[in-house]
């Protein structure tokens, strides 16, 4: 082999916003373990902006099969494209069958990932997920991904998620907030009231409205509501129930990289258990997380500035997208609890009080 040859590594990145953020320590570890390699990240188009400003890659490949028909043909087409790149190693972070199938069909020489979803035969290095007997044990997703890079003898530079916002995106966010009347001398508090996963993760709009009014009345702050795609009605409902006037980022909904920049400049984030909560963790911002159907063990790491509010119920965690019962896991979390957690975080990390 030529001394000039650079090993070529393909990393199949997670699709969900939160999972992608929690995978960034593993992405950093791969670069640390293979400093001279050519590293390409295969990532869905809608989340590319989250990680494209990070310095741990040589190339980003946008992978979007939503317009391919039928889906199988799209997968085969992508596999053929990747085959032409002649990758030596594929690191498959998602658990899906299709993510392993793609790199298998692409002829990547070495394929590393978890042996789940009946896909172990397509991996050259199938890893067993953490288990207690026959049961898979939930662990923090940061650690879950890092165990893959551990198997490649990569060092662990950090377990803290890492994000970067480009200067042009920072300016876009700054100009947007200025146009909407936000004064930089005031605290910016950001609320994330939706959840792409499903309605089971969503707290009541009237509860958000109560908390928002309290914070505006007590602090000289701007209260910003950031809905995701298809969630504008939630933001409008919150506004209609408020005595004060919030800022709503809904016309149009801001891209994820701009939302990252806004959260980076926020004093506090209040969020359902949804992807952008992890932006706050990566930027080491105080965040109150209202958690219902999710198992907290998947995110039980890097919580130094995070307060997670949840109810221990016999039906939770269920991981259902829509609650088939009375949604007690979310409705039982009162606005007063969120206000108390918010004031505690503001006092400790922002206002300097004990």
Image (tube, grey):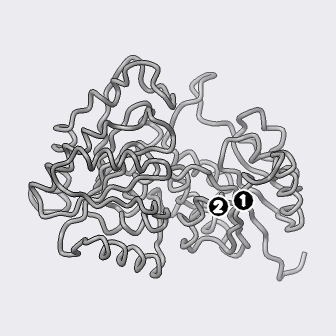
Residue 149 against residue 259 in the figure, above or below: above
Q: From the viewer's perspective, is residue 45 above or below residue 70?
A: below
Q: Which residue is rendered at x = 89% and y = 79% of the image?
A: 2
Q: Where residue 308 sits: x, y (%)?
A: 31, 41
Earlier in the chain: of badge 1 and badge 2, it is: 2
* Residue in view at x 60 percent, y 48 percent: 147
Instruction: Name the side, left or right, on which 134 lies relative to 125.
Output: left
Q: Is mark 2 on a helix, strand or loop?
A: helix
Give the quarter of the image for residue 284: bottom left
Left or right side of 112 for 308: left
Q: Residues within 10 Å of mark 2 (few under 14, many from 20)?
A: some
Q: Nearer the viewer, residue 114 or 306?
A: 306
Q: Mark 1 points at which residue?
A: 63
| Mark 1 touches mark 2? (CB < 8 Å) | yes
Q: In which quarter of the image is residue 28?
A: bottom right
Q: Which residue is drawn at 75% across and 65% down?
A: 9
Q: Residue 70, position in %: x, y? A: 84, 45
**Which residue reaches farthest front?**
240
Which residue was labeled with disc 2?
Answer: 45
Mark 1 lies on a secondary structure that is strand
């Amino acid at each position: 082999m030529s001394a000039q040859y650079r090993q070529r590594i393909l990393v199949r990145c997670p699709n969900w916003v939160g999972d992608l953020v929690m995978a960034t320590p593993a992405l950093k570890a791969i670069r640390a373990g293979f400093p001279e390699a050519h590293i390409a990240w295969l990532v869905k188009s809608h989340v590319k902006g989250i990680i494209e400003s990070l310095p741990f890659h040589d190339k980003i490949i946008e992978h979007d099969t939503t317009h391919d028909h039928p889906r199988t043909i799209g997968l085969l087409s992508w596999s053929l494209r990747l085959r032409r790149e002649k990758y030596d190693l594929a690191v498959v972070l998602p658990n899906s069958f299709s993510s392993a199938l793609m790199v298998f069909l692409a002829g990547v020489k070495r394929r590393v990932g978890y042996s789940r979803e009946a896909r172990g035969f397509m991996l050259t290095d199938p890893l067993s997920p953490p288990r207690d007997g026959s049961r898979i044990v939930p662990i923090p997703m940061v650690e879950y991904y890092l165990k893959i890079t551990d198997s490649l003898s990569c060092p662990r530079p950090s377990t803290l998620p890492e994000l970067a916002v480009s200067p042009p995106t920072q300016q876009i966010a700054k100009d947007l907030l200025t146009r909407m009347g936000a004064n930089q001398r005031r605290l910016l508090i950001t609320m994330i009231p939706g959840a792409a996963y499903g309605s089971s993760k969503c707290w009541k709009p009237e509860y958000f409205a109560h908390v928002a009014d309290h914070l505006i009345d007590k602090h000289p702050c701007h209260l910003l509501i950031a809905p995701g795609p298809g969630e504008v009605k939630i933001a409008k409902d919150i506004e209609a129930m408020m005595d004060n006037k919030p800022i709503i980022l809904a016309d149009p909904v801001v891209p994820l990289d701009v939302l990252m920049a806004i959260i980076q400049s926020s004093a506090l984030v209040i969020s359902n258990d949804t992807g952008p909560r992890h932006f706050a963790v990566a930027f080491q911002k105080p965040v109150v997380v209202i958690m219902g159907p999710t198992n907290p063990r998947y995110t039980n790491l890097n919580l130094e500035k995070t307060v997670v509010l949840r109810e221990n119920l016999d039906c939770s965690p269920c991981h259902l997208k829509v609650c088939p019962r009375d949604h007690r896991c979310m409705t039982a979390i009162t606005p007063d609890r969120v206000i108390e957690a918010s004031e505690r975080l503001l006092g400790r990390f922002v206002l300097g009080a004990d």
